[in-house]
Amino acid sequence: MLERALLQCFLILVCCSELALNRKWHPYKGRRYDLTLFIRNHNVTDATFFRLVGVDNTADFNVTAGNTFEHTFEVKRKGYWTLFVEFPGDRYAKSPRKVISRDSYRKWVMEVYYYPGAVGFSEWHKVGRKSKRG
């Protein structure tokens, strides 16, 4: 009788631990997802480097005028993303912040323009899925 009770307790303990570890029962626990960001440099030629700062991620890169930088980040939570463009002489330009969450699109594009004495940033644009038309 005692052995049967111990066996039942053990089985209940195993089932409860499996349920506790199952992700389905933790709907608000952070899950990782891939976020791809594109930076299109239209005509910025004298930048030292570009820096993309976001949720627990930073990317330093150079992208020549007329080209696009693409990087996929592994993100755990929602947060702000900001692009910095650094120029010689400790000058830099900072883009507007954008909140990106797991519920929004997975691919975003920002375009960078150079004007005499200033840098212009577009808003973040989402890259949608291409629909198949018959």
Image (cartoon, helix red, strand yellow):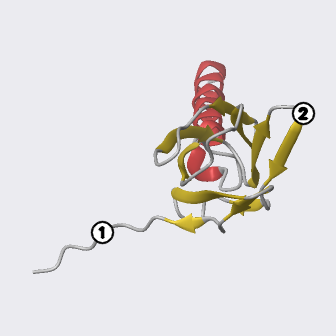
Toward the viewer: 77 or 133? Answer: 133
Disc 2 crowd rating (10 Å Cα; few below 14, some 14-19, many 20+) is: few
**Amino acid type at image mark 1:** Lys
Q: Residue furthest front?
A: 116
Taking 54 as reference, is 128 above or below it?
below
* Dot label at residue 119: none
User: Viewer-proximal residue, 92 or 51?
Assistant: 92
* Image x and y of residue 2, in percent: 66, 21
| Left or right of residue 64, residue 88 in this image | right
| Residue 21, picture quadrant | top right
Disc 1 crowd rating (10 Å Cα; few below 14, some 14-19, many 20+) is few
Q: Which sits earlier in the primary sequence, circle 2 or circle 1? A: 2
What residue is shown at x 76% (from left), y 51% (from top)?
82
Which quadrant is the C terminus positioned in? bottom left
Asked whether the viewer can see residue 114, the reply is: yes
Q: Residue at x 81, y 32 (%)?
A: 88
Q: Which one is in front, 65 or 75? A: 65
Q: Let me know if residue 104 appears in the view.
A: no
Residue corresponding to mark 1: 130
Q: Nearer the viewer, mark 2 or mark 1?
A: 2
Percent from the top left, x then y, of residue 126?
A: 53, 67
User: Mark 2 = which residue?
Assistant: 90
